[in-house]
Image: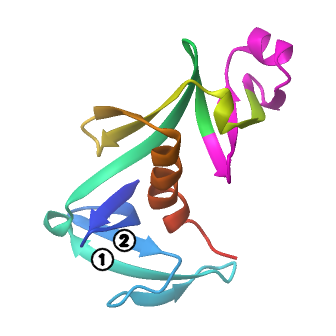
Amino acid sequence: MLAEYEGKVFKAEIKDNQVRLWKYVCVEGFEKKQTGRGHVYYEKILPIAEIAELFFVKFIAFIGNRQFLVDSIYADKLYVICDDTEYAESHGFSELERGEWIKKMSLEDFDGFQMIKTVGDSGKKTITDITAEQLKENYQKYVLSVAIRG
């Protein structure tokens, strides 16, 4: 789960009426912690009322009417996931795990993109059509900015 707090995006976990926010880069006012594996992160626990929004985000890429879940983005290349075995086998996908196939493709291979934002536990979804440039910007904001570094 993600949370927006003071205009920034953090990983989040709800416990009772509190939200634990954390990020793997230094955040002023957050307490420095370390995982069992040695990763340093910065954490703050706040009342849920102080959090602007709790949500999940995923990105979809389209070729015609066929949609693919965007797994990751590197420069102008996407790793996309497909759950249609027949299509995947005939289009050069590699089996990731049973029933899920993955392939690295160019941004130009796709006809369009969407960002799907699901709010907290309500399940309310906002689906936004986005450009390739907006896909990269939003992936940076909602995925890379909260990922483990180095």
- Relative to 136, residue 90 above or below: above
Q: Nearer the viewer, residue 120 or 108?
A: 108
Q: Which residue is drawn at 69% across and 78% down?
A: 37
Image disc number at residue 45: 1
Residue 48 found in image quarter: bottom left
In the rendered structure, find residue 77 and report the number of the disc placed on it: none
Disc 1 and disc 2 in contact, CB within 8 angstroms: yes
Q: What secondary structure is marked by label 2? A: strand
Task: Pinpoint residue 42: horizontal percent, then vertical percent.
Answer: 45, 83
Amino acid type at mark 1: Ile
Location of residue 44 by image quarter = bottom left
User: Which residues lie in the magenta part?
Assistant: 71-100
Spot occupied by residue 81 in the image (x, y as percentages of width and height): 67, 31
Q: Where is residue 118 in the image (x, y as percent from the top left)?
A: 33, 39
Q: Residue at x 84, y 12 (%)?
A: 90
Q: Which of marks 1 and 2 is nearer the N terminus?
A: 2
Q: Residue at x 30, y 77 (%)?
A: 45
- Circle 2 sits on which residue? 21
Label 1 element class = strand
Q: Where is residue 105 in the image (x, y as percent from the top left)?
A: 74, 35
For the C terminus, give its image quadrant. Answer: bottom right
Residue 76 as seen in the image, left or right of residue 96: left
Q: Please, which residue is most extreme toward the left here? A: 49
In depth, the one of 83 and 36 nearer the eye is 83
Q: Report how far apart the C-alphas of labels 1 and 2 lie in the structure.
A: 6 Å
Q: In this view, does 9 lie to the left or right of 144?
A: left
Q: Type of residue at label 2?
A: Leu
Look at the image and say whether residue 77 sits in the magenta stretch: yes
